[in-house]
Image: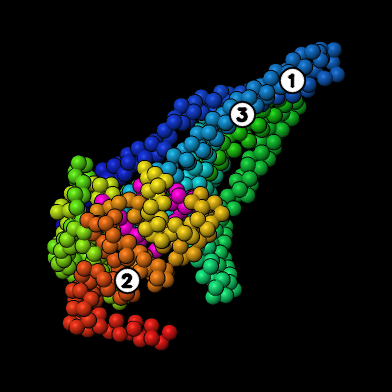
Amino acid sequence: MAKKEKETQTKQPKRVKGAFKRGAAMFWSFLKGYRMLTFLTPFLILFDVYIELKLPEIMGKVTDYIMVNAGTDTFVRHDLNMLLLKMLGYTLLTLVVGYINARCIAIAAMGFGANMRSAIFNKVQDLSFDNIDHFKIGSLITRTVSDTARIQTLFSTTLSIFLRGPIMLGLALKKSISISSDMSKMFYFAVPGIAITLIVLGALAVPLFKAMLSKMDKFNGTLRGNISGIRVVKSFVREDYERGEFEKINNDVAKANIRAQSLVIYISPIIMFIMYACTIFALKNGSAIIIRNAIDGVKGTLTYGALTAFMSYITQVLSSLMTVLMVFVSIVVARASITRVAEIFREEPTINDYDGDPALLVKDGSIRFDHVSFKYSEEAEENILTDIDLSVESGEMLGIIGATGSSKSTLVNLIPRLYDATEGNVYVGGENVKNYKFKNLRDGVSVVLQQTMLFSGTIKENIRWGDPEATDEQIIEAAKAAQAHDFILEKENGYDTELGQGGNTVSGGQRQRLCLARAFVKKPKVLILDDTTSAVDTETDAKIRAVLRTDAFKGITKIIIAQRITSIMDADRIIVMDNGVINGMGTHEELLQNNEIYHEIFVSQQEGVLAQ
């Protein structure tokens, strides 16, 4: 036991070191294109600090000159003006250097943030359905928008303040000690006081900020669901209810944010108290030294000008210390965001095509499920699909029916590898789906998912998603096959009609037909339609099924999931799903005679038709 603990202790630093290297490499990649500006910043800051430290020195000389020479014959206005002009020159130089530095930091920070958001977006594109289910859509949006904004702000703050702080702190402290080592001893108390304040309050704030970000995830999920389902909300007159739910989660976010910020707001007044205390101490002791020297007739090293400069250096020392430690607090507070973003990059896709053969293409539409079982997580006790053994010939039309939750969609999702089988193997075109590259497999398998999704852009652009190289004639041909051509022409701009976000300018049935056209233009080897005619009328449904029987679709394997038996009754074979297993298989006539579930569905639907 002791030996194991010892091994764990020796391995831990390596893991930490490895995590640090991966994190450093990740953030280094976000700087691509902006590294020169980033590395230019420290040199500009060093020059700017040097100039700022010269200003109190000149100010002290001006004060001493006035105090010593005012009202005497030795007072020369020209000498005073030269000092003031020198001070003005340094001030203008600070303005120019500060502007250049601020511009470099702004460009570098914006580029850093843009690269980070692109990297997250690209990573999400590589994740499988399983990974996305794990994170949830609302959380991914929060991480891509809010968390990256917080990290970008931290990056900008680090460049502009953190690099400047230590340089200013060290040099201003050196200047202070050179003026009065005795008065500089107050920093022995002031520096630890500020450090302890910031570190303690920052550490206490971390869990509160994590809780706030978790609330923000929920807020984004609620907002996204409400806006995307606004038509449903209005149709059920649930606006008041949704307002109430929104107010609850919005107030939760506000309260969590207030709790987190309530600790941070103590930082400024405490530090300002320490700074003013130091100023009072310096004024009291410095004035006492100058007065005592004047009474004793001693010419001390601490002059009026030196005290003035010392007061400026106090402000610079404590301000720079505060900014350095504030960045540390920002890092602590932003650590939750950094961790959440890093989680996305650490997430390994549960499905990948690293071993796929780039030259392997889907040669035909044959499909085989070889004793396939599936569950969404390894921890789940029961399978969603159990021992599916099924072969589908190339060009065959297969219908799938079953009660809601019988795993019809899950079954077909295994064909294009949207999920991977837990046990057994799935074959397409005679090859294990794991042997294909995603692009080659999914070019050969076209899926119209249960939830229709269109994108901002024109009708033509949405149909062309199926094949970016499709000509206008091929797009029109696909639209005709999907029974969409006529309603498209009724639009004012025809195929150039803008659909809006999610296709909200067309009806549900029209969206389904446009999604069908998008799949048809692809000319795949396997065509999967997951209840994609549920929103169209029976006449249009019949026309679409008739098209699938034409020569244009000969050789294409058609798999149709439907709730209506009329949508699949003319299929070559129909399988009946029940609780993740194949309950029956055959033609429409065979299942009517031999399968109880199919017979019950048919009778209930016929009674519904007669009742109408």
Does dot 3 land on a helix, a strand or a loop?
helix
Q: CA distance from mark 2 to mark 1?
A: 91 Å
User: Residue 158, percent across and down?
Assistant: 50, 38
**Residue at numbered disc 3:** 99
Q: Amino acid at mark 1?
A: Leu
Q: Amino acid at mark 2?
A: Ser
- For residue 567, which numbered disc appears in the image? 2
Q: Which range is magenta?
A: 444-467
Q: Residue at x 56, y 54 (%)?
A: 492
**Residue at numbered disc 1:** 84
- For residue 485, which numbered disc appears in the image? none
Looking at the rendering, in which quadrant would you find the C terminus?
Answer: bottom left
Q: Are marks 2 and 1 in contact (CB under 8 Å)?
A: no
Residue 474 visible to the viewer: yes
Residue 219 visible to the viewer: no
Point out the tag, 2 or 3, that comes first from the N-terminus.
Answer: 3
